[in-house]
Image: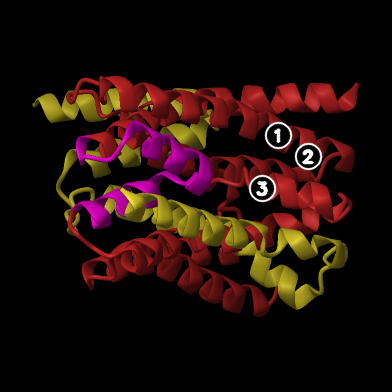
Chain colours: A red, B yellow
Amino acid sequence: MPSRSAFRAGVAAAAPLAVGVVPFGLVAGAGPVAHGFSPWSAVGLSTIVFAGASQLAIVDVLAQGGSVLVAVLAALTINLRMVLYSASLAPYLSHEPTRRRLATAYLLVDQVYALCIARWAADGGRTDERLPFYLGIATFLTTIWIGCTVLGALVGPAIPDDVPLDFAIPLVFLVLLVPILVDRPSIAAAVAGGAAAVAAGEAGAGPASTIIGAATGIVIGAMVDARGPTPAPS
Amino acid sequence: MNRIWATILLAGAGTYAMRASFLAFAHRMATVPPGLARVLRQIPPAALAAIVAPALLRPDGHLDLLQPTLVAGLVAAAVAWKTRNVGVTVVVGIALLAALQQL
């Protein structure tokens, strides 16, 4: 059965990412409790908002006495990149019924996006294997994410400070970034996107830095791309 | 305590709307015009670099080129280039950063 093996392939692709998701989930669970919110609210954040960095930002804003509006805007600014992920994956799932796409959109997180686009952009593959692959990744990571949130909310972070496990998150994106830098447009998009994100952070853009960087990279990459096909600089 | 739940529901609804935005209309994107395809192609490198670069260049919230995170990240990039393996790259990167921080 192709869908079952594609699901398993998704789980296998996501397995190494657990090393980053476990500590992040523990922090997502322990953070709200440490700031005086209930363990249930930690679980609510991890299941309903379901986007780690924005969850930490929400707790940060509310714990400092900020309003609901400010907390929501901070979270949505951080999560704006989801629109880009949605646009990027949509052409690859156009054959799926709308109801199914709307259901699976709920599980669209950084790691699911990055692993799927790396695989689908490389060789498209069989269309009927795409959604099972997506669901294999998402099911595996979501289970760990929720489980570690609950654990973190009940027992605290429980990770020694001198092991920098949170570094696993950017490392995962680094592994997925390196192989897609294959031509001038993609290199231009990455260099401009990275530089603009850093510059925006230095300028005090805070949580908006990521989306500012991504948008800048897309514009620069598209401009380089529009100048016509160029050989890879090797 | 109601402030946290109001925030959770509003941020959750907004985040879901952003996740579903283009996927909801994917049936109209079966054939993507070349201009749009050109823009969509830039999303993976631009978005991933916008996450990775600040994590390596300003790990403590300010630009800093002489710190262990950048060194570990550059070595990890070389490992990623060679192996294309998530597990190997993550283990090497974290072990190197832990070792450099002990110095």
**Observer-nearest of A217 and A3:** A3
- What's the mark number on residue A135? 1
On the image, the x and y values in percent for residue A110 come to 53, 46
Establish if B82 lies above or below B63: above
Q: Residues within 10 Å of mark 3 (few under 14, many from 20)?
A: many
Instruction: Categorize mark 2 by other alpha carbons within 10 Å: few (<14), some (14-19), many (20+).
Output: many
Mark 1 or 3 closer to N-term? Answer: 3
Label 3 sits on what residue type? Ile
Q: Which residue is mark 2?
A: A131
Label 2 or label 3, whichever comes before in sequence order: 3
**Residue A228 point in image, percent of width and height:** 69, 76
Is A179 covered by the magenta stretch? no
**Which three-letter amino acid code belongs to the residue tagged 1?**
Leu
Residue found farthest to the front:
B2
Q: Dots 2 and 3: beta carbons under 8 Å?
A: no
In the rendered structure, which segment of residues is drawn in magenta?
A: A34-63
Residue designated by label 3: A117
At label 1, counting other C-alpha atoms closer than 10 Å, the crowd grade (few under 14, some 14-19, many 20 or more) is many
Gap in Å between the C-alphas at discs 2 and 3? 12 Å
